Structure formats: C-alpha cells, structure tokens
Image: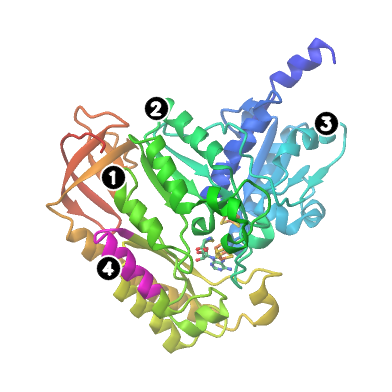
Amino acid sequence: MNTATVDAIKTRKLHIESYGCAMNFSDSEVIASIMGEHGFTQAADEHEADVIFLNTCAIRDNAEQRIRERLKHLRGTKSKNSDLIIGVLGCMAERLKDKLLEEEKLVDVVAGPDSYRDLPKLVAEVDDGGRAINVLLSREETYGDLNPVRLNSNGITAFISIMRGCDNMCSFCVVPFTRGRERSRDPQSIIREAVALRDQGYKEITLLGQNVDSYLWFGGGPKKEYKKLSPEEQESSVDFADLLEQVALAAPQMRIRYSTSHPRDITEKVVITMAKYPNICNYIHLPAQSGNSRVLEVMSRNYSREWYMGKIEMIRNIIPDCGISCDIIAGFCTETEEEHKDTLSLMEWSQFDFSYMYMYSERPGTPAAKKYSDDIPEDVKKRRLQEIISVQNQISQKKNQNRIGKTFTVLIEGNSKKSANDWVGRNDGNNMVVFPKEHYQKGDFVEVIIERATTTTLIGKAVKKSAPF
Ligand code: SAH
Ligand code: SF4
Ligand code: F3S
C-alpha cells in the first residue's frame, strides 16, 4: 500500500447513530474503537461522514419503522455523495439479514451484533465495489479486550457491558434471535474498564446485561449452570453479586449501577451486596411485564405475580428505600380485561418509582408470533396502555411530592435541558434532580434539598458539596 492510500484511509470519517437500548449505545463505542484502529475518526456530523452506521433496534415494529424513515432520508444525502457508505448494524440487521440488502438498495453493509470485528473488512469489500454482510452470531464474542471509545459522552457516566445475548426466550421478545446465546465477559476485563474510566475522571458506571442475575464467569466458554460446573470451576466462579462487589471495591469513589435484573433470578446475595457498599446505588430495574400469573406464563417469564411480589418484599426488607422501576407490556396475546386489571393492581401494590410502558408489538419468528394470535385490538391495547401510564403517573407524582423537603446526594451530569443556568443529575435512587448551578461543577457530588417536583423531575437547591461516599 503506498503512502497516499494510507493517508486517504487515515482521513476517513465515521458517523454512528445508536437506537434502542443501552446495550446498543455501548456497542457503538466498541464499533468506534474497532474502526478507530483502522484509521476512521469520528465525523462531526452526518454531512462530514464517509461512512454512516445506523446501530439499530428491532424490539418493536415502531423501532424498525424509525430506521426505515431514517434510511429514506439518507437517500437524499447519498444522492449528493455517491461514495458515501451506509451500514445497518445491530438487532434489525440481525433480524432481517440479507432481506435488508434486498429491500433497502442504498444499504452497503449489514452487520449483526457479533460481527463488529469484521466491519473494517466489510467496508473494504464495499470499497472494492460490492455490498457486504456478516450476521453470524457467536457463543464466545464479548469484545472484552477492546477499549471502547466513549461517544457523545458527558465525561461523567458510562456503560460497561458485562455480558451479551439472552437465553431466556420470553415469548414476545426478539432479543434472543438478534443477540444470540448468553455469554459472560471476563471479570478482569470489566474491572480494567472500570478502573480506566475512573482514571479518565468518570464518576458513575452502569453494568449492562439483558439479565445481569445470570452473569457467571468460570473461565470462559459458553454458558453453563452453576450446578453443572466442576468443583474447581465452582470454587473460582464469579456470579453477579461477586462481580458487583469486585467493581465496587476496585472503584470505591465511583457510583455503580446496573441493569437489567430478572425477577426470576435476582438473589438476596445481590441485594445484600448492594446494601453493603455505599457506592452501589440503591436502585433496581425489575421488569414485571404483567401483573397476572396466567399472562406471565404465556409470556414464558418463569415467575408468577406472587413470586414477583416476594422479590419486591425481599428488596425492601434489605433496602427499605430502594428505588425500583419496571417495564410493562399492554395487550399481550389473550390478555383479558381482568388480567389487565391485575397489572394495574400490581403497579399500585409495588409503587414503582417509574416504568417503561409499551403496547405489545408482534415480532416475526418469536414464540408468541408462532403460537398465539395478536388478538387484542389496537384500540383496546391503546386504552390499556393509557390506563397503565395513568396509574404510574399518579404513583410517580405522589412519590415525588413526598420527596419535597428531603435532601439527596446528586451527581452532576451536565446542563439541564430546559435551562443553561441549571444542572441536572440523579440521586442514588435514579430520580432526576435539577437545581441552579451556582459555583458547583459537572462531576461534583452535591447535597440538594428538594423544593418542588413534577412526575419525572425533582427541583431543588444545592446545599453543599458532599464527599461521594
Ligand atoms: N432484558 C430485559 C428487557 C429487554 S427489552 C428484561 O428481560 O426485562 C426491553 C423491554 O421491551 C422489555 O422489558 C419489554 O417490556 C419490552 N418489549 C420487549 N419485546 C416487546 C414486544 N414484542 N412488544 C412490546 N414490548 C416489548
Ligand atoms: Fe427479552 Fe426476556 Fe431476554 Fe429480556 S429476558 S431480553 S425480555 S428474552
Ligand atoms: Fe433493541 Fe436490540 Fe436492545 S432489539 S432493545 S437494541 S437488544
């Protein structure tokens, strides 16, 4: 390769857009790292880019429609710059595979979540005049050895993926198909990443997995259940509670969060570990999906309403003021009006701090799509969702009103969206807190007294800087 070609490669610019869950945002940082090693720098915006990657989500139909719209828009951009390379990555790429190349003529690269190391080669194939695809899923890939390039970062909070894939097969969910088998990442590489973030001045880490409670490291390789490990493997194995402890000890001045817990698998050991270390935030995202045991069975969630309530009790017994949030699906196949009401009553009983609430969206190829008809009419789904949202809003409103007059430790993450004179950050329980900047700085831990509250935000005044822990 002559120098001119090397220079040409060195100056190429990449623009990555991330859609969907935190896992995708975290993957984009891995992608930036891989492409960076092959001479790609980050473009300031899409117009400056030689390559545009859309890191996509397939969780609901509307997530995919959004990407289709974005691709339509990019047709205009590409018509002005025919050398522009467009890649569709992530879960929608994995779900649709080569169909995506057939359906969207402007797409040059299709790459699934386990094939990102191959991206420079796929782009080179496009440089040679082709279109390129790799949607192979892996049982081992965790990208654990890479140094993610932090994108759109506030410099204060960062994600660390601790595992990939999901083995749960909840009947409504496309994730096991788009992200493949569950595998855990080497704890040493997780600790290294946490310490590197600390050294760069980050103050908060969120450990990510689709079901963090089934994290298990025993030396690598495909997942095995704990009871199937040899005595030596059991002796040296690291479960999620062990990992949390190791990260908390390795970065004692940083806040540690994690997501997502699974109601079937969350253990007392995890919650006791949270209680033991002040730098592990007292907040758990524990998606129930439904409050009715029959619907939960049809969803293949492997727990009942009573089991879920037992887990909430267990958490509150150990950490009485633990923040708890939830995901709910409205109008899943066969759900009756009575069963929907069970979801509302579970929400009332649980008093979630907030919830992510969705209408059921049938995903082709999932067990639910194969076994059941999507039989709840759209208008009924919408009405049920509205009722769910309204119950949650009342709970959030009430809980936030009760926080007025209290003082919380808040980590300042950046400017408030509404006012450049205010900071925004979160308290330990993951409530958003806004307050006047005064002399405080981004990254400070500050004591804030709450004066007002909306459904989603606490508004207050800083009292003093606080020692983090
Ligand atoms: N691993 C997490 C959730 C990942 S997907 C867990 O097990 O809880 C995030 C949320 O999207 C899910 O909790 C669920 O509420 C919602 N979701 C997933 N598939 C869906 C579908 N087909 N229709 C509507 N919502 C869905
Ligand atoms: Fe999907 Fe269930 Fe896995 Fe969550 S646990 S990603 S809902 S299959
Ligand atoms: Fe979407 Fe894939 Fe996450 S489907 S929610 S981006 S795992």
Which one is in front in this view, the residue at disc 2 or the one at disc 3? 2
Identified at 65% across, 61% down, the residue is 176
Start and end of the magenta stretch?
308-323
Q: Residues within 10 Å of mark 2 (few under 14, many from 20)?
A: some
| CA–CA distance in space, label 3 to label 4 | 55 Å
Q: Residues within 10 Å of mark 3 (few under 14, many from 20)?
A: few
Q: Amino acid at mark 1?
A: Pro
Residue 431 seen by the camera: no
**Which quadrant is home to the N terminus?**
top right
Residue placed furthest toward the front: 231
Which one is in front in this view, the residue at disc 1 or the one at disc 2? 1
Residue denoted by label 3:
127
Q: Amino acid at mark 2?
A: Gly
- Tell me if 3 is positioned left or right of 90 in this view: right
Task: Name the spot of residue 419 as percent of width and height, x first.
Answer: 29, 38
Secondary element type, mark 1: loop
Residue denoted by label 2:
201
Which one is in front in this view, the residue at disc 2 or the one at disc 4? 2
Residue placed furthest toward the left: 405
Which one is in front in this view, the residue at disc 3 or the one at disc 1? 1
Identified at 61% across, 73% down, the residue is 171
Residue denoted by label 1:
278
Task: Name the spot of residue 248 as percent of width and height, x first.
Answer: 38, 41
Secondary element type, mark 3: helix
Identified at 28% across, 65% down, the residue is 316
Q: Earlier in the sequence, mark 3 or mark 4?
A: 3
Q: Earlier in the sequence, mark 2 or mark 4?
A: 2
Q: Is residue 314 above or below residue 298?
A: above
- Tell me if 131 is positioned left or right of 152 in this view: right
Magenta span contains residue 446: no
**Which quadrant is home to the C terminus?**
top left
Q: Amino acid at mark 4?
A: Ile
